Amino acid sequence: MKIKAINPNTTLEMTENIGTVANKYTSDETEVVAVSPERGPVSIESYYDDYLAVPGILDEILKAEDGDEEYDAFVNSCWGDPGLDACREVTDKPVVGIAEGSMYVANMLGANFSVVTILPRARDFIEEAVRKTGLEGHCASVRCTELTVVETENTRDAAAEALLEASWEAIEEDGAEVICLGCAGMGGLDDPLEAELPVPVIDSVGAGAVLAEALVKLGKQTSTIRTYKPPESKEIIGYPDRYQR
Amino acid sequence: MKIKAINPNTTLEMTENIGTVANKYTSDETEVVAVSPERGPVSIESYYDDYLAVPGILDEILKAEDGDEEYDAFVNSCWGDPGLDACREVTDKPVVGIAEGSMYVANMLGANFSVVTILPRARDFIEEAVRKTGLEGHCASVRCTELTVVETENTRDAAAEALLEASWEAIEEDGAEVICLGCAGMGGLDDPLEAELPVPVIDSVGAGAVLAEALVKLGKQTSTIRTYKPPESKEIIGYPDRYQR
Amino acid sequence: MKIKAINPNTTLEMTENIGTVANKYTSDETEVVAVSPERGPVSIESYYDDYLAVPGILDEILKAEDGDEEYDAFVNSCWGDPGLDACREVTDKPVVGIAEGSMYVANMLGANFSVVTILPRARDFIEEAVRKTGLEGHCASVRCTELTVVETENTRDAAAEALLEASWEAIEEDGAEVICLGCAGMGGLDDPLEAELPVPVIDSVGAGAVLAEALVKLGKQTSTIRTYKPPESKEIIGYPDRYQR
Amino acid sequence: MKIKAINPNTTLEMTENIGTVANKYTSDETEVVAVSPERGPVSIESYYDDYLAVPGILDEILKAEDGDEEYDAFVNSCWGDPGLDACREVTDKPVVGIAEGSMYVANMLGANFSVVTILPRARDFIEEAVRKTGLEGHCASVRCTELTVVETENTRDAAAEALLEASWEAIEEDGAEVICLGCAGMGGLDDPLEAELPVPVIDSVGAGAVLAEALVKLGKQTSTIRTYKPPESKEIIGYPDRYQR
Amino acid sequence: MKIKAINPNTTLEMTENIGTVANKYTSDETEVVAVSPERGPVSIESYYDDYLAVPGILDEILKAEDGDEEYDAFVNSCWGDPGLDACREVTDKPVVGIAEGSMYVANMLGANFSVVTILPRARDFIEEAVRKTGLEGHCASVRCTELTVVETENTRDAAAEALLEASWEAIEEDGAEVICLGCAGMGGLDDPLEAELPVPVIDSVGAGAVLAEALVKLGKQTSTIRTYKPPESKEIIGYPDRYQR
Amino acid sequence: MKIKAINPNTTLEMTENIGTVANKYTSDETEVVAVSPERGPVSIESYYDDYLAVPGILDEILKAEDGDEEYDAFVNSCWGDPGLDACREVTDKPVVGIAEGSMYVANMLGANFSVVTILPRARDFIEEAVRKTGLEGHCASVRCTELTVVETENTRDAAAEALLEASWEAIEEDGAEVICLGCAGMGGLDDPLEAELPVPVIDSVGAGAVLAEALVKLGKQTSTIRTYKPPESKEIIGYPDRYQR
């Protein structure tokens, strides 16, 4: 089985980490290839970043579908599941978002969960991801920190400390029973944090990857009957050939 | 007062119609300038189209903010309010989506409303716009037709007929008390439809334009404290200079 | 255009202030006439006050409809939108409540809003107004003070101070991105408060008035198909002739 | 025990029927006195009627509280629970609405319920009563008929037939497991309808009366800590002395 | 009238208390017989306890239905309403849960209520009971203590103190207007607590008992049309004869 | 990896089918052992059956935890997830319900899903399972048939036909984009049905099994901090030793 994990931003260290984490959790016979789009922001922290990242994410799926790459599933690896609906329109292979994947996993391990994440401005963005999945009733809280996306990746000790503090607040003040790490850049921090916390800590890329594997095993594909049928054929002015449907 | 109405797609006939309708409803001293992005799909019917349109929409706001254009407000003129959150990050001038605008107007005129709109595949897209605004409890139904976006503009008689039929179904089967025309391409069909229906029919571009005018009169700007503060400065690889923050 | 702004209570200083504020925000060619009912409580702070005010509010619309006054729209100027549904039954001209108007405006300017308002007992009353509109998901909090309605009007400095404190709590503890001033008596305090706060502050009467203007420009009337059709003809024992339908 | 059942409208035949039904279901040692207000509409079918009835309802409670009447509880006997919040402010004796009472009873007898009621225009009014109580998730449907309030009382056979038809639709199309008769005028029709239907049929006045009795037995009074504390003392211009607090 | 109050656990002191409380609040001519199942946990504090208690609860109803006991209604006397749906399948006589009963009563006495209850682990269990009834929108909070079920019964002073503290927190921090005592073992503590608190305090067994009485007076039975029709006849392996349907 | 799939009923043909289906979808190196409890109903169709099955389900987990069986996870294999919360209290190994598992899978493959299932009486039971998971907003409908549980297993052709019809209704009338087979007895019918339908069809046991496998790969265990901590130690009267905690 071969899975393409798309890091929606263009920071290659993060892409590498995503590949490492995803391969750590999936089966030996599953190969996860992590990629970054050719174009887009170096991190996603605002709605602006989010929307400018989506064309690049779609391009990575279009490449796989149109070219001679052979993938069985895709993992959209940002904790806002950017453009997930559009991804499902351009392939009928399963596409799993790491936000939704984390929440399904959390929902099977505790009566509720909290998300610990980056900058305060991202709260609305994260809450939308929760809401999109339908699990807002199980979300005890979204706890933001002062971490940027790049800091989650580059200053591991400081990031771990900030997330530890936010997690304790979620547990003690909001009654959280599971912690979701709300950014792909936090990949690999689940075990060290879990060692210090009394609750399970979910790595989002890991969760997304094992769920993508699960869907491939089930042999099911995305429904193309209505919402996710292929986009109508039309001119997309100013976009490369690959985008023309 | 000067308002920029952005047609998120690149079909110029529709842009022209948006300008005509918006100027019809706003005050004489208000000038509405309708524009299309330089890049993007010729119509928005799928999530794919929606996401590929957003960078072009943002560009139209960035131009206005960075250059020497002087606008007091913006109207995002597609009934899915594409990228509306991102628009609000790149300007603190009011940005009104025509979907939200239509629904606020409808909510002041009846106990509930239905949206009559284009292809069945757009139902989820439309429902998301309703949900984003918070008014799902007031939405009696979303009634799709077999109309494409371009047909709403180019085959007026057929479009009017299909919308009339969908409106009657909404009124008789779903108990709708107000009809929202769920596509900017339907601009100008409100009066002919209202002439044949027992309920008010809301033109979306008209609704968006008069609400934008209202916000300017109130003299209020978008909150920049958290969700809509300007995007963090960072590299946006592969995007023109104007997008670099 | 001529708009009748009905102050639901019988305190004339407040009526005068409502007129001043509404005319300040609306166009020069729009005339807003503020009135008080002939009967009813001097302020609305309880459900009791609210219900005893409604017959007087309705009377002001009945006068306009039956007599020779010529109005294009009505603004129900109490932040509980008292009797708003009944108002819409006795006229097909647009009737805008200042609570709903404030919330639509706030919802276009931030990801959420808080309402700062009068006595704690009014919380349920205010929350009902929020809920009626459908926007409870966007309401970060309702923050009450120890202010009576009359104090909001008569002791401006103390009122401003109490509202400032409540607003800071809403911003810092509840994450509010926009503040709605939750009483018509607070008219005119929006600018001084906004000068000291990092978020937009919405004057309710102003919001209601510019939205009423917007509806008139759109040329739409209240739906009379079902909920808001004229009341059935019947005897209303003990009420003056004007109430008999 | 002595309970005052207030018929919110001024049709005395209906008041008499309310008394008969309430006394039929309550204990022998409980006396239910049914009254009509001195002022108000002869029936409640619109929001307009509803609001014009409330001052009269309140008067009946004020009389009991201020004068030398001795009641242990009140039943607000219209299936919209008009002014119920205000009633609870002017007495700390239990006040039960027949709409809420019907729904609590229905919720203990089936997995869901439908309300069969009067004219289509009342749907929104009825749905508000359901929503106020919090039980909308258990309400399978509201089924309106062409019956006026007076017809439910005066043309019993025709009323029973129309309600039977609406009930069958609720059972077969909406999956209703319990039927609530949604108007006090339908008092006494529960048994004949239940004889022809495969589900329990709830008489609203009966339900309200036995719940009022239950509250008195428990010896609890309305909470006066915040929402339902007595109204602030103030002038109520143009209202009789009894209304002045 | 004869009512069977089933204490779902096997602690007989608690059963006795349930009988005392229920008979205190119901009419003289009503006899409430309190019983414990023959099998099951000595207290219900976890979902595990809850599920192991249900077969015994059902047995007490089966006995009454199949044997020569004559009861008019049943009260399921644990504040989680364990197995309430199943109880309603095996008898068509009214079955009232003390959780739902408490909440209906509370909802008629205040704008909202809080539940003060046992160990923190029970929060989810209690919240499910609230949610099942549909009243989560009226529930200001669930406040847990460090009390076990047995302690609520056996160490009355300590229990009262802990509940008083939790109640004050609910009132002051969560705005509770009514307190529900969230465990049958707290029976009899309502009056002493109410003496020290500014809000009504609801005894759950009392509330359940008077509502059961009310349903019997109304003469209505559980709907057997769909959800609560008698279980299909089938073999229940390893269960005594009485369980075989 | 070794997973125990517990068929909550005592029909051994169904247990065998559950084992076959689960092993078909999971990896070669994963062994799924399907078992039935020693006690309980031969099928689960009512709440009564559901509650009488739970002690047996718990016994199968207690055996695995206390004895010398070695399992990595459990699958609760009835589409009502009976006693799932209690299961999570008695083991910290992952326990996946097939209802929740089906819905998570469906939610990743389409914008919504419908459940096609057994007898009409089970609708409430199925809807509770949907609600428990939080995904009611994504559930287009629950479509019942006249099939008993045993018939889904024993009369495959008739079962397939009834499910096909219900699925078409869900697709055409309710807009379903994915079909969930709402009973473990339907195991193996997903492919034949999918061959005749334009949407993915989810086998519940398969979905539960691959998700259990995914959780084991992630290496996470159930949160024991609050809701799912081990039950308090106490006497469980009349239950075998294994149940005593």
Image: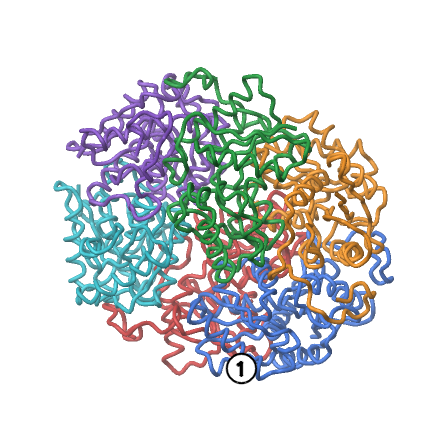
Chain colours: A cyan, B red, C blue, D orange, E green, F purple
Whole-percent x, y for residue F124 in the image: 49, 34
Image point 63% across, 78% down: which residue?
Answer: C151
Q: Quadrant of residue C211?
A: bottom right
- Amino acid type, mark 1: Asp
Image point 29% across, 46% down: which residue?
Answer: F223
Residue B188 in sight: no
F104 vs D84, left or right, is left
Whole-percent x, y for residue F93 in the image: 24, 39
Q: Quadrant of residue A226?
A: top left
Up-down relation of residue D76 to residue F201 (above or below): below
Q: Secondary structure at mark 1?
A: helix
Whole-percent x, y for residue A83 in the image: 33, 56
Of the pair D180 and D124, the residue shown nearer to us: D180
Q: Quadrant of residue C75?
A: bottom right
Up-down relation of residue B22 to residue B99 (above or below): below
Residue bearing mark 1: C191
Of the pair F30 and B65, the residue shown nearer to us: F30
Of the pair E237 and F24, the residue shown nearer to us: E237
The number of callouts visible is 1
